[in-house]
Amino acid sequence: MISTNQKNGFGKSHAKIILIGEHSVVYGQPAIALPLSAVKTQVRITANGTNEQTIDCRYFSGSLTNLPPSMKGLQHLIAYILTKVIQPVAGFKITIRSQLPEERGMGSSAATAVATIRALFDFLNCR
């Protein structure tokens, strides 16, 4: 079992913006996209000394098993990664802090997924 003694994981990602061709990519055509590295999403995972796995973000605070339907993709991502870990995982708290506005085409869902994956890999000591 992964130790809960001051175990932490950290991951970050950033926004993107599509300058030209936002809808053309749907049809297999090119677009011009740029990273917005000043607009960040950060995820911190901290061992909590229990078997409970919780999350705290702007949309929800509580058990991972009780995430609202709009966050089921994130729940699935976390569960998938945890099933790939060879050893059992103790409880932890995931804290997500993001400067990205949702539903504005800046990639907030992707940035959250990338930062969460990076934080989980760091927490689980996977490289």
Image: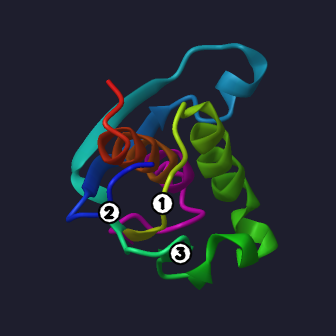
The C terminus - image quarter = top left
Q: Quadrant of residue 92?
A: bottom left
Name the amino acid type tagged 2: Thr
Magenta span: chief secondary structure: loop
Measured from the top left, where is residue 97 in percent x and y?
Answer: 35, 71
**Part of the protein shown in magenta:** 97-111
Measured from the top left, where is residue 63 in percent x and y?
Answer: 62, 79
Label 1 crowd (10 A; few <14 / some 14-19 / many >=20): some
Q: Earlier in the sequence, mark 3 or mark 2?
A: 2
The disc at residue 4 is 2
Measured from the top left, where is residue 109 in percent x and y?
Answer: 56, 53
Q: Could you say whether the residue bearing mark 1 is in a helix, strand or loop? A: loop
The reply to whether callout 3 and callout 2 are in contact (CB within 8 Å) is: no
Would you say residue 60 is visible in this rendering? no
* Side of 107 relative to 13 (left or right): right
Q: Which residue, given by chain and number where applicable, does mark 1 sit on?
A: 90
Q: Residue at (74%, 78%) from the top-left corner?
A: 66
Q: Is residue 71 above or below residue 52?
A: above
Q: Which residue, given by chain and number where applicable, does mark 3 sit on?
A: 54
The residue lying furthest to the bottom in this view is 61
Q: Which label sits in the foreground, 3 or 2?
A: 2
The reply to whether callout 2 and callout 1 are in contact (CB within 8 Å) is: yes
Q: Could you say whether the residue bearing mark 3 is in a helix, strand or loop? A: strand
